Structures are given as structure tokens and as C-alpha cells.
Image (spheres, grey):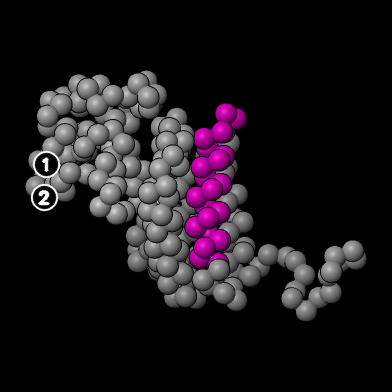
Amino acid sequence: MTPDDKHLQPRKTPRQIRAELTRQRILAAAAHVFTEHGYAAGTTNRIAERAGVSIGSLYQYFPGKDAILVALVTDHLARETPDLDELAALPLADAVRALVHAAVHNHNDDPELLSVMMQQAIRWPEVMPLMAEQQRDRATEIRSFLDRHPQVDVADTTTAANLVVTTVGVVAHWLTAAPAALDPKSLEDEMTAMLTRYLTGSADGPSQSDPPPPGIR
């Protein structure tokens, strides 16, 4: 973000445990307020009251509710990728399941809040580059993981990493926040199976040397 985007940036970064706990209380309160009252009616006064802090204390951390929402979106995105170093020693299917589980659980935790966050975040062109940057960072981390894992068998790990990040994020979002949301455990099982087959090269399908089906050129 640029200096012109100060209304979307926190006013200070907590350096002490007490300050970080206050920041987390404000964010947790905002999550409840935005879910219960909607974003338009989710005022900073309501957030401060729910958090049990003064409005002055809230403004010490955030210039307004827009910055609070951006912090919620940022924290949400950061929770979607577990520590890949810890997954490197696992069988690939278990590592993939951990990735999928983190995303599904993160989205299923509060789908109503997630809908509010996404609907409002896309209003600000400043936020989209931030989300894109975080996605690129996750893809880079996953590509490094794929390069190291002995069971991975794909021709291009850069493309594969971006496919994994996008598939997990988009599918988890749409199929947990939808009105007829799927069962989280079933969704986790099927996504794990699908991605594991792809990453190990065991999915059935025509090879690159096979001719295309009739009518497709």
C-alpha cells in the first residue's frame, strides 16, 4: 500500500503482549459486530463497546473500521497456509490434507464474516494488490515445498503451486460460504484426493503425446 492509503493501515504495531491482546480483542469484536450488524452499521463505537475498550483506545490502533476490516482480511489470508517445513517429512497425501484442512477450517469458521470481508474488500483497489501479493508469497512457499517433496511428479512446480493455492482458496471459499454449504469433512476428503492424484501424476488422462479427441484441435 502507498502512503495515500493510510485509512487502510493500522496506526501502530503492538510490540508488547498486552498491546497485541488489545488489538486481538478489537479484531474479534469487529468480527462479531460486522456479522451481527453488517458492515455499514458496524460502527467503531459498537466495536469498541464490544471489545471493552474506549473509542480513544481503538483509534490508537486503527484510524477507522476500514483499517480494521483490512486487518481481518490480512489475518484471514495468513491463516490459510500452515508451516510447510513441518509438512515436508509427511507423506504427500497427509501434507496436502493439512493444507486443505487449514483452508476449509478457516473458511468454515465464520462464513458470514468471510462474505462481509470479501464484499467490502473488493471495494478498495488498494486491497487487491495486497491479497495478490499474499497469494504470490504462498505460491512461492508451496513451490519450494513441491520441489523438495520426493512424491511430487509434475512437469512445472511453479504452475502446480499456483494451481494448488488458487484451487484450495477458491473452492474452500465458495463451497463453505454458499447457502447450501458442503460438509467440511467430505469437502476436505475429496479435495485432498483430487490434489494428491494431480501432484503425484497418478490421475488418469491422455498423455501429452496422445492425439486430441475428435473435434478438438
Residue at x 37% of width, y 53% of height: 130
Residue for badge 1 = 19
* Image side of residue 89 versus residue 4, left or right: right
* Image side of residue 31 versus residue 177, left or right: left
Q: Do the residues labelled 1 and 2 touch (CB within 8 Å)?
A: yes
Identity of the amino acid at label 2? Answer: Arg
**Residue 153 placement (x, y as % from top left):** 58, 74
- Residue 15's label in the rendered image is 2
Quarter holding residue 8: top left
State whether residue 175 appears in this view. Answer: yes
Q: Which residue lies furthest to the right in this view?
A: 214
From the image, which quarter does the C terminus lie in?
bottom right
In the image, residue 163 sits, relative to residue 177, either above or below, namely below
In the image, residue 71 sits, relative to residue 89, either above or below, namely above
Quarter holding residue 117: top left
Q: Is disc 2 placed on a helix, strand or loop? A: loop
Residue at x 45% of width, y 30% of height: 112
Identity of the amino acid at label 1? Answer: Ala
Query: 39 or 105: which is nearer to us?
Result: 39
Query: 35 or 56: which is nearer to us?
Result: 56
Instruction: Decide whether the magenta segment is chiefly helix, strand or loop.
Output: helix
How packed mark 2 is, by other alpha carbons closer than 10 Å (few <14, some 14-19, many 20 or more), is: few
Q: Residue furthest bottom?
A: 209
In the image, residue 186 sits, relative to residue 145, either above or below, namely above
* Image side of residue 175 versus residue 24, left or right: right
Span shown in magenta:
160-180
**Residue 159 placement (x, y as % from top left):** 55, 68
